[in-house]
Amino acid sequence: MGDVLAGIHATWEFESDSVLVRFERGIRTPKLFQALGERRIPHEALSSVTLTPGKRGTVVLHAVPRAGADPLVEAAAGQLRESGDPYRLVLPAERDTLAEYYADTLRAALARGARDAQEPAERYLVAAPAPPLHFKAFDGKAFFDGDRVSFRWFSTGASTTKWKAGDQNLPVGELHGVEWRSPELFDGYLRLLRRDGTGTGLPQPARADHDPAAVVFGLGYGPVHESLPFAAAVLAAVQEASPSRASVTVPAVASIRRDPADVADRIRHLGELHQAGLVTDEEFSAKKAELLAEL
């Protein structure tokens, strides 16, 4: 057992070749942390370590992961809020001296590693959440048993395109990546990227609600702590099934300019939810602003 540094929502245990992160299960702990439970981060999965002032009398120890080393970080594609970053340990400011000691210790361990920490990892070095996993989306349920992903459509939420296509069962061997757009955005979704018989990626419908290889989230559906670990587990399985063990595809999340008519329809639907009491005033204003920003 190595030295232990206890912070807010998590405890880091420093071992000879890794950092074992144990997350608390308290009511104030982010749900993603609670879902992850604990994670072992090998030193070779890190690129650097920083210690910076935090908010409201805190300091933040941040172990920065290497590109391609963690399927969870790869799936998130920069969409996690700072408060939901599992590589940040927040501590009271009076513990900054102790935090600096451990930051220096970890930097020294990284410096001893026989590899370039700035180079992308050739394979995932941090374990993904273990299947079976499942979550409820707006238009269906998603299941992953370790070998295949299944989507079961809801008659009240799925588009006509998906309903006609029928429930989906996609082996990981037929996939080359995953696209996760955070449910904290208005039009979040999880999309499986399929390959054809030659290994080339198949074209994807522009809209996830018309793609039988995708589920859409909607308000209250596909929360981060359920859908992101799911996406990470699928990514890890896809890489494991790849003969070359090469990194899988995770498209960058980009802002998409919408058809004004489509935005108007979405705002109208959002207004109906607001009038029905299913969306608060704050949620309505925030989501409406997001939609208008996409014009």
Image (cartoon, rainbow, N blue to C red):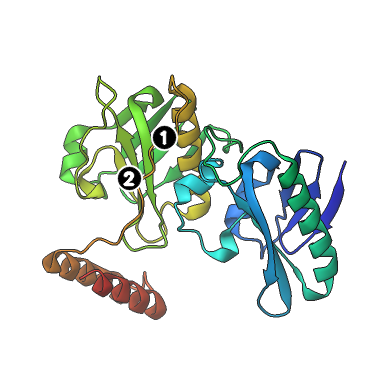
Residue at the spot x=47%, y=25% of the render? 245
230 relative to 267 in the view: left or right: right
Mark 1 element type? loop
82 relative to 39 in the view: left or right: left
Q: How far apart are labels 1 and 2 at the CA level?
A: 20 Å
Residue 30 place in picture, x, y as percent: 61, 60
Residue type (three-letter) at the residue carrying disc 1: Val
Residue 150 or 86: which is nearer the viewer?
86
Image disc number at residue 65: none
Label 1 or label 2, whichever comes before in sequence order: 2
- Visible residue check, residue 120: yes
Residue at the spot x=33%, y=25% of the render? 174
Q: Mark 1 points at which residue?
A: 248
Figure check: 23 above or below 257: above
- The C terminus, quarter of image: bottom left
Q: Which quadrant holds residue 186?
A: bottom left
Q: Mark 2 points at which residue?
A: 215
Residue at the spot x=63%, y=42% of the render? 45
Residue 29 place in picture, x, y as percent: 66, 61
Residue type (three-letter) at the residue carrying disc 2: Val
